[in-house]
Amino acid sequence: MEYAFSIVIGYLLGSISFSYLIAKKIAGIDIRSHGSGNAGATNTLRVLGKGPAILVLLLDLLKGLAALGIAYLISGGDTLAYAFAGIFAIIGHNWPVFFGFRGGKGIATTIGVALGYSPTAFLIAVIVTIIVIAITRYVSLGSLVFVTLLPILLYTVAHQPMLAAFSLLIMLFAYIRHYKNILNLLRGTERKLGEKVNKNLN
């Protein structure tokens, strides 16, 4: 029963789209109809600026951590319940039931889940990711590096084979959601951090 609770709570928490809610509150817009069309922190940065983007990043990260914390309390620290909560928080963010299943790419929530899974693996992955973004200015590339490193670090550094296995699914989700970004990176047409875009998709 604790696994079912962890799945449901993780998914429902993940389904809270802070990018959508903040954009509606601040600018009266559907963030998914502006910029890249993604309901996440990077698109919020492009459309609304640094303040709202930082707020979205933190809230999306915290909902991943919150899902893990609740699962921990419900299950008494059961690793499988913990793993399920993290996975479904990301699924909720990507495909939110409250917003027509049109969400973001799940990276900020993944960062929160990674922190809960293993602070050490999280820290190493974040440092490498920041270096990659600083050098290339590609947030998407840094995001893909992060999710690729996560299962490796969870297995080799944190010695958590079950969480490493679950993080392979997290990596798969990220690659699916970043499909267009991957194509743009290969073509050399991916937007760099700080690059201006048209706010309206239409």
Image (tube, grey):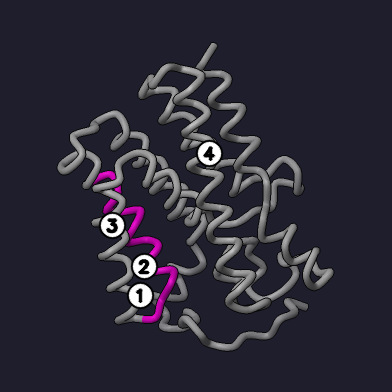
Distance between mark 1 and mark 2 Cα atoms:
5 Å
What amino acid is labelled 3 in the image?
Answer: Ala
Q: Earlier in the sequence, mark 2 or mark 3?
A: 3
Reading the image, the residue beneath label 3 is 125
Q: Name the quarter where the N terminus is drawn.
A: top right
- The one nearer the camera, 70 or 98, is 70
Q: Nearer the viewer, mark 4 or mark 3?
A: 4
Crowding at label 3, few (<14), some or many (≥20) Cα neighbours within 10 Å? many
Distance between mark 2 and mark 3 Cα atoms:
10 Å
**Residue 67: percent from left, percent from top:** 53, 35
Quick one: SS at disc 3? helix
Q: Name the quarter where the C terminus is drawn.
A: bottom right
What amino acid is labelled 2 in the image?
Answer: Gly
Q: Say if 56 sits above or below 173 in the image.
A: below
Classify residue 60 as left or right of residue 198: left
What residue do we see at 43% from left, 72% from top? 139
Pointer 1 and pointer 2: residues touching (CB < 8 Å)?
Answer: yes
Residue 146 is labelled as none
